Amino acid sequence: MAHPFFKGLLFGSIVGGVSALLATPRSGKENRDLALSYIEDTTLLVEDVSNSIHSLKGAVTELSTEGLALLNEFTEEMTESVEEFTLQNEPRMRRIEEKATKLTADLEEFSELMPDLEELATKE
């Protein structure tokens, strides 16, 4: 879509320039000097835009590379942190499981004794 626009812009510039040259009251030498100056200015502007685009491409490439490196570094650090957390807390988790198992066994034993305690309470 932009490509036809720039063709039209270039064509319009050329047609406008030629019609201005033909309709101007200046001499041919003055017109040539003005045209040459305009062409030089336009060339410099196009070079500036080209350099800016090249710089932008380089910046985007560098940003992409740095972003990917940071993402990889972050992923590695998070993986290490999770592994370290798991290793540090594994003994604690094992102890919690052992305590929960013992508590469950004690509750079962208590519930088995409960009928005997109820009988004792009713006898008194």
Image (tube, helix red, strand yellow):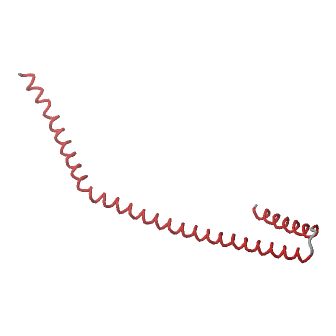
For this rendering, which residue is in front, 17 or 97? 17
Residue 10 in the image, given as x and y percentages of width and height: 82, 67
Residue 99 in the image, given as x and y percentages of width and height: 19, 47
Image quadrant where one finds the C terminus: top left
In the rendered structure, the answer to whether residue 36 lies left or right of residue 69 reads right
Q: Residue at horizontal 31%, vertical 58%?
A: 85
In which quarter of the view is residue 116 placed?
top left
In which quarter of the view is residue 35 placed?
bottom right
Image quadrant where one finds the N terminus: bottom right
Residue farthest along the left direction in this orientation: 124
In the rendered structure, the answer to whether residue 109 lies left or right of residue 17 reads left
Q: Residue at horizontal 87%, vertical 65%?
A: 16
Residue 63 sits above or below residue 113 on the image: below
For this rendering, which residue is in front, 118 or 56? 56
For this rendering, which residue is in front, 10 or 41? 41
Residue 104 in the image, given as x and y percentages of width and height: 20, 42
